[in-house]
Image (spheres, rainbow, N blue to C red):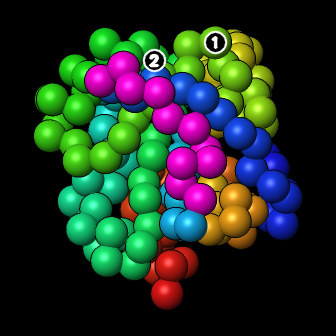
């Protein structure tokens, strides 16, 4: 996980519609950048739906929400449509942002080790500096927790 106070790494990734987004386009706004393991899984769905439900409140506070996983553009599109998500999902199958933000880690499940995305949320200020970082994310509570951090 990247340290609070460091400059957020630039990225250039396609969203669920194939449109390219960069970190610099969010300059002047607070950005909630959350990394999650996989579209259409129970925890990731709870997390995404939480952000979608609270999206108007994030907008009121001048914050933008962006989710990133290694899933494809097509997978993100299905995920967005299945749950009527109202925010940007970025596809990072090459792991460029995932590795730059230090969320690609060894994980263990049922005694097996494998590499994967550790659910992590960053709050990035208007100048592109990380002001909050959390790698102990509870999927169902993440959106609410991040909303309170904007106060």
- Residue situated in front as seen by the camera: 110 or 90: 90
Region in magenta: 17-27
The image shows residue 58 at horizontal and vertical percentages of: 36, 69
Count of numbered badges drawn on the protein: 2
User: According to the image, label 1 marks what residue?
Assistant: 94
Mark before the other along the chain sequence, 1 or 2: 2
Q: Residue, x 22% and y 43% (percent of image)?
A: 85
Q: Position of residue 10 (x, y in %)?
A: 71, 39
Along the line of sight, which residue is nearer the eye, 123 or 50? 123
- Around disc 1, counting alpha carbons within 10 Å, would you say few (fewer than 14), some (14 to 19), or many (20 or more)? few
Residue 25, magenta (yes or no): yes
Q: Quadrant of residue 9?
A: top right
Name which residue lies at 42% across and 54% down.
Answer: 65
Image coordinates of residue 37 in percent, x first then y, are 51, 29
In reply to whether residue 113 is colored magenta, the answer given is: no
Residue 145 image point, x, y percent: 47, 70
- Residue 68 vs 128, above or below: the answer is above
Q: Which residue is mark 2?
A: 71
| Residue 134, numbered label | none
- Circle 2: is it few (<14), some (14-19), or many (20+) Cα within 10 Å? many
In this view, 9 is above or below 82:
below
Q: Is residue 108 visible?
A: no
Q: Are marks 1 and 2 in contact (CB under 8 Å)?
A: no
Task: Choose between 124 and 140: the one closer to the eye.
Answer: 124
Per the image, label 1 sits on a secondary structure element best described as loop
Left or right, 142 with reference to 132: left
Instruction: Look at the numbered disc 2 and give the secondary structure of its residue.
Output: loop
């Amino acid at each position: 996980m990247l340290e609070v106070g460091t400059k957020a790494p630039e990225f250039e990734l396609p969203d669920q519609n194939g449109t390219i987004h960069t970190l610099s386009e969010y300059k002047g706004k607070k950005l909630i950048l959350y990394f999650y393991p996989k579209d259409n899984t129970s925890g990731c769905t709870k997390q995404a739906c939480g952000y979608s439900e609270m999206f108007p409140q994030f907008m009121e506070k001048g914050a933008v929400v962006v989710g990133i996983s290694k899933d494809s553009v097509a997978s993100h599109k299905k995920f967005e449509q299945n749950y009527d998500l109202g925010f940007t999902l970025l596809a990072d199958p090459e792991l460029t942002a995932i590795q730059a933000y230090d969320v690609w880690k060894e994980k263990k499940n049922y005694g097996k080790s494998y590499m994967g995305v550790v659910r992590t949320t960053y709050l990035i200020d208007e100048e592109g500096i990380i002001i909050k970082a959390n790698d102990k994310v509870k999927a169902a509570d993440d959106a609410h927790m991040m909303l309170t951090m904007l106060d």
